[in-house]
Image (cartoon, rainbow, N blue to C red):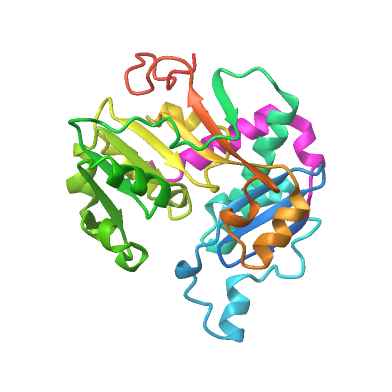
């Protein structure tokens, strides 16, 4: 599937905004230790996880210059130019492209109030999530809120993570290497996936091997975009954020801030849920949004 989720979402944005997209520029762009973000010329903001561990050039000044050759020239570029970087090999350019896609999604929602899916703000994607009583759960990424919920429920689950050092002792009891994804993902009745899989392009391949009929949640500030493509490929719930104060959130992430610093202040939690037919069983292939 390649980058098909990002590709189809970008196409949906281009169609939704039409000629207006060409008028929108990125007024401000910020890279933080944990998150990066943009503010558009229309005031809307978007955020994306900063993939620090995937930047091999970030070791000295000369090589770091190659990591982001556009430094000093990020402001004023058109949003359309940023979207073109969704398939760029440069991971930092791709990071800002995803943040821009999220900001453009917020632009669309601010204009369009009727949707074929449910939008809820001020609520976490895990708040009402039911843990399977007898089924298996697989979590991809160190998503602390769901891990706490699973441990409290004494659930049968595995957490797949590339770096086991991100897990605490009780979580480590359920650890499995990310390389064993093909072994565990097809068994999951509930599959919870970090939004950072959008950056490294692993999300499409994960969805390909998911169990038919599984409930699939993709969560994290990175996954704060139009959800139709996700529903089409089997995702049940998309959990992200909606930026409410663009400059404030960029100031926070520029000072090494994380969700603890901006939730309820410059951003609200956002839940996007398929309101139609189950995305895994819809016969027409529309992902349950027809």
Q: Which residue is drawn at 57% across and 36% down?
A: 270
Q: Which residue is drawn at 48% across and 53% down?
A: 199
Q: Say whether residue 78 is visible.
A: no
Could you tell whether 142 is left or right of 123 in the image?
A: left
Kindly give the residue lying farthest to the front in the view shown. 152
Q: Which residue is drawn at 37% across and 29% down?
A: 234
- Depth check: 41 or 73 in front? 41
Q: Where is residue 17 in the image (x, y as percent from the top left)?
A: 72, 31
Count of numbered marks = 0
Q: Say whether residue 246 is visible.
A: yes
Could you tell whether 90 is left or right of 15 in the image?
A: left
Q: Where is residue 186 in the image (x, y as percent from the top left)?
A: 21, 38
Indicate whether residue 170 is drawn in magenta: no
What span is colored magenta in the figure?
A: 1-27
Q: Is residue 29 above or below residue 245?
A: below
Q: Which residue is drawn at 28% across and 56% down?
A: 171
User: Which secondary structure is most common in the magenta stretch?
Assistant: helix
Indicate whether residue 20 is drawn in magenta: yes
Q: Position of residue 72 (x, y in %)?
A: 76, 70
Q: Where, by quadrant of the figure, is residue 162 drawn? A: bottom left
Q: In this view, does 204 lie above or below 255?
A: above
Q: Position of residue 73 (x, y in %)?
A: 77, 66
Which quarter of the figure is the N terminus placed in?
top left
Could you tell whether 213 is left or right of 88 in the image?
A: left
């Amino acid at each position: 599937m390649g980058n098909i989720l990002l590709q189809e979402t970008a196409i949906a944005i281009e169609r939704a905004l039409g000629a207006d997209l060409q008028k929108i520029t990125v007024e401000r762009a910020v890279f933080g230790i944990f998150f990066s973000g943009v503010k558009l010329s229309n005031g809307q903001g978007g955020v994306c996880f900063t993939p620090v561990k995937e930047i091999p050039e970030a070791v000295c000044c000369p090589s770091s210059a190659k990591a982001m050759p556009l430094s000093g020239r990020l402001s004023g570029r058109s949003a359309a130019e940023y979207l073109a970087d969704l398939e760029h090999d440069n991971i930092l350019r791709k990071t800002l492209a995803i943040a821009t896609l999220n900001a453009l999604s917020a632009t669309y929602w601010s204009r369009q109030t009727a949707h074929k899916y449910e939008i809820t703000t001020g609520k976490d994607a895990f708040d009402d999530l039911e843990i399977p009583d007898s089924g298996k759960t697989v979590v991809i990424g160190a998503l602390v809120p769901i891990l706490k919920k699973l441990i409290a429920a004494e659930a049968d689950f595995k957490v797949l993570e590339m770096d086991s050092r991100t897990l605490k002792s009780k979580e480590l009891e359920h650890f499995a290497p990310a390389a064993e994804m093909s072994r565990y993902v097809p068994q999951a009745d509930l599959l919870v996936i970090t939004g950072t899989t959008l950056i490294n392009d692993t999300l499409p391949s994960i969805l390909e091997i998911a169990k038919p009929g599984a409930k699939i949640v993709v969560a994290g500030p990175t996954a704060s975009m139009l959800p139709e493509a996700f529903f089409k490929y089997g995702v049940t719930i998309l959990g992200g954020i909606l930026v409410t104060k663009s400059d404030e959130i960029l100031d926070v992430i520029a000072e090494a801030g994380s969700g603890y610093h901006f939730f309820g202040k410059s951003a609200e939690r956002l839940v996007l849920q398929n309101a139609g037919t189950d995305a895994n069983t819809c016969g027409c292939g529309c992902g349950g949004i027809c």
